[in-house]
Amino acid sequence: MLRERATEPEYFDSPARTPGEIAEGYRELARANRLFFLHDPYTRLMWRWLGAENCRELSILDLGAGDGWLGAQMEKFATHLGWNWRVTNLELNPVPLQLSPARHNVAGSALALPFTANSFDIVIASQMTHHLASDAEVVQHFREAWRLARHGVFITDMTRNAFLYAVVWMSTLALRLSPQMRADGLLSVKRSWTRAEIEALAVRAGLNASVKSYFGSRWIVAARKTPAIAAASETSAGCPATDEFCSAPRGK
């Protein structure tokens, strides 16, 4: 069942959903996000990877940001430390962005980002990659993120394995999520890429990135730019990145 990646579309991505269904879906998703500490790689780990001295002022682009939940958590975390993180939420569907109208929101595709090169200090994406259709789209997603980042990219998503499938099955039942959300949660695992698969796709994208496991449930792609590479990104989206260590705990 999990040997090969599934390609069946998720209900969450259906264009037939009404604004009310979308809003309710994000309310349910927020409960799951809190349970799984979705923000943890971007609060506990990312600043250590960057170094505290590089985190006092950051402009961040969040790809596939949905209703902006993660960006709000990141800004709150930074404010607590006396830092200023400014998160721009990019989402293909403009309806979720309307759920947080006071935030900096942009409707657009992660495969053709509507910004010039080096527009943001850091480009992130959390639980977005598995919504893409193919290996080629993942490669394009990585290249576009790299093109826009002045300092680096930090991308996370689920990894396809039986352990996570069982955890999601039990958790969605415990949270009493709707049947559609429970089905989508399991399908998300089946649609995900494994760490080894993502590592190969990062190489295809031109990123000499660190690809680490996060508690056996997610992978983290982290790649930093040197000043020379940042300058080269003005004309090329496929430049090699420096190989940086991401301080995520090793999983299985």
Image: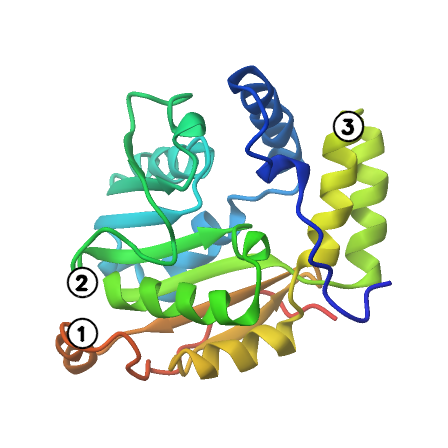
The chosen color scheme is rainbow
Q: Position of residue 146 (x, y in %)?
A: 31, 68
The percent position of residue 28, horizontal first and vertical second, equals 65, 26
**In which quadrant is the C terminus drawn?**
bottom right
Q: Could you tell me if the residues under marks 3 and 1 are in contact, i.e. CB atoms within 8 Å?
A: no
Return the residue at label 3. 175
Q: Earlier in the sequence, mark 1 or mark 2?
A: 2
Instruction: Decide which of 61, 109 is in the foreground and name it.
Output: 109
Number of dots carrying numbers = 3
Q: Quadrant of residue 34?
A: top right
10 to 94, vertically: above or below: below
> Tag 1's secondary structure?
helix
Asked if the residue at tag 2 contacts the one at tag 1, i.e. Cβ–Cβ closer than 8 Å, the answer is yes
Q: Secondary structure at mark 2?
A: loop
- The residue beneath circle 2 is 118
State the separation of the CA atoms marked 3 and 1: 44 Å
Tag shown at residue 230? 1
Q: Is residue 185 left or right of residue 61?
A: right
